[in-house]
Amino acid sequence: MTYIYVDSGERVNKVAEAVEWILHHQFAIPIIMHYLDDYLSVSAPFLSLASKQRSIIEEAFTYLGVPLALEKLEGPVTELTFLGITLNSERFEARLPDDKLADIKQLVLDASSTRSIPTAKFVSLLGKLSFAAQVIVPGRTFMRRLWDTAKKFSKVPRHYRITLSGDCRKDLLWWQEFLASWNGKSFFLYQAETSSTDLGLYTDASGTLGWGAYYANEGRWMFSRWEQDTMDLSIEYKELYPILVACATWGHMWCRLRIAFHCDNQAVVDCLASGTSKSPPVMALIRKLFFVCARHNFCVVARHVPGKSNAIADALSRFKLQEFRMLAPRARQGPDTPVPLPSWD
């Protein structure tokens, strides 16, 4: 990795476009990122190639007449800090500095324990959470309502105190619960999606009986009846519930994956895509699902498929165990015990 600092003033954007075009098209350097006048380049995993790539980058800047702050050049190395986040190309890891993580935890705790918060402090908190969300990808979902609240008070004095809504407090609770047990590290996610069928993962819900989940690659399975207080909830809730339980129970085996669930319920697809739902019970499941994703370092999306064929999980959701055994002869002898879900809503 090579870190380049460009002291270019008002020419930053034009220089950035020119540099990226030249390096990509003329020198075949495929990966170079920039934010204002900070540049990061990622090279092949050989020191000699990385050093050559750095030389090419410096020559390109010289060719364009862009001065470099030589004292801020860094690399090639396998670990460096870029825009406040430590990146490690050997462990494929992004890490927040300990002091910044501690600062964010305290700000969230302070905001959660008061009835109202000054506008300036609230905006500062959102900035810190946005910074953390660069490493905690699912955390972005739990900033939308906070940012919407900030926009409503964008023209009030900085000392004006904002009373946070119940949804905002639930989002802060999500952050508080997650940050309390997080070590500040996350692995880079794979760019390509892994479909649930490639993973051998199938879930299904019966509206009146229960739910089932089958993890074919490991021969693992689970099923359960609906509790009485769940019977009247929407089919959207019931379809999402086994996905959550599967992720909570087996998600520790899916680190770095982007998992695409195939689902014939468009409402489930939409709520996973947006990270929100108008239904409070469904929104509670989404909060818990994304918490599990962040804890185990993977993410989930849903892809709509009309009238999916899902015989194995369907048999489990309807308690047809003989049929399940016929369809899944390699399944383990007994079911897995679902991992307890977070207790908060």
Image (cartoon, grey):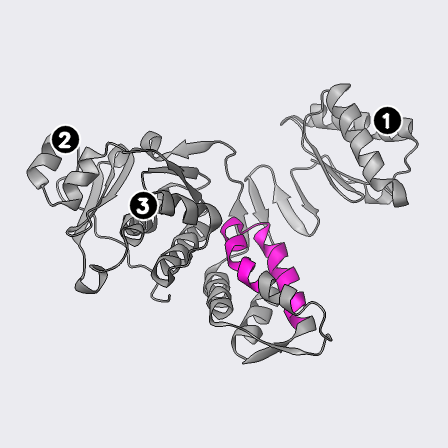
Which SS does the magenta portion mostly show? helix
Q: Quadrant of residue 229?
A: bottom left
Residue 283 image offset from top left, x and y in percent: 40, 59
Instruction: Look at the image and tell me whether residue 140 can be seen.
Output: yes
- Residue found farthest to the bottom: 115
Q: First in sequence, mark 3 or 2: give its number.
A: 3
Residue at 69% from the left image edge and 37% from the top image edge: 77
Look at mark 2 in the image and give the residue it sits on.
Answer: 327
Q: CA distance from mark 3 to mark 2?
A: 21 Å
Answer left or right for 103 relative to 331: right
The stretch in magenta equals 121-146
Look at mark 1 in the image and give the residue it sits on.
Answer: 59
Residue 219 image offset from top left, x and y in percent: 22, 36
Q: Amino acid at mark 1?
A: Glu
Mark 3–mark 2 CB contact (< 8 Å)? no
Q: Quadrant of residue 87?
A: top right
Residue at 46% from the left image edge and 45% from the top image edge: 273
Residue 174 image offset from top left, x and y in percent: 46, 63
Q: First in sequence, mark 1 or 3: give its number.
A: 1
Answer left or right for 233 relative to 102: left
Q: Amino acid at mark 3?
A: Trp
Q: Would residue 307 be counted in the magenta stretch?
A: no
Answer left or right for 101 relative to 332: right
Crowding around mark 2 (Cα neighbors within 10 Å: few <14, some 14 to 19, many 20+) is some
Look at mark 3 in the image and give the residue it sits on.
Answer: 250
Q: Which image quadrant: the N terminus?
A: top right
Q: Secondary structure at mark 2?
A: helix
Q: Which image quadrant: the C terminus?
A: bottom left
Residue 33 position (above or below residue 123): above
Q: Secondary structure at mark 1?
A: helix
Q: Amino acid at mark 2?
A: Leu
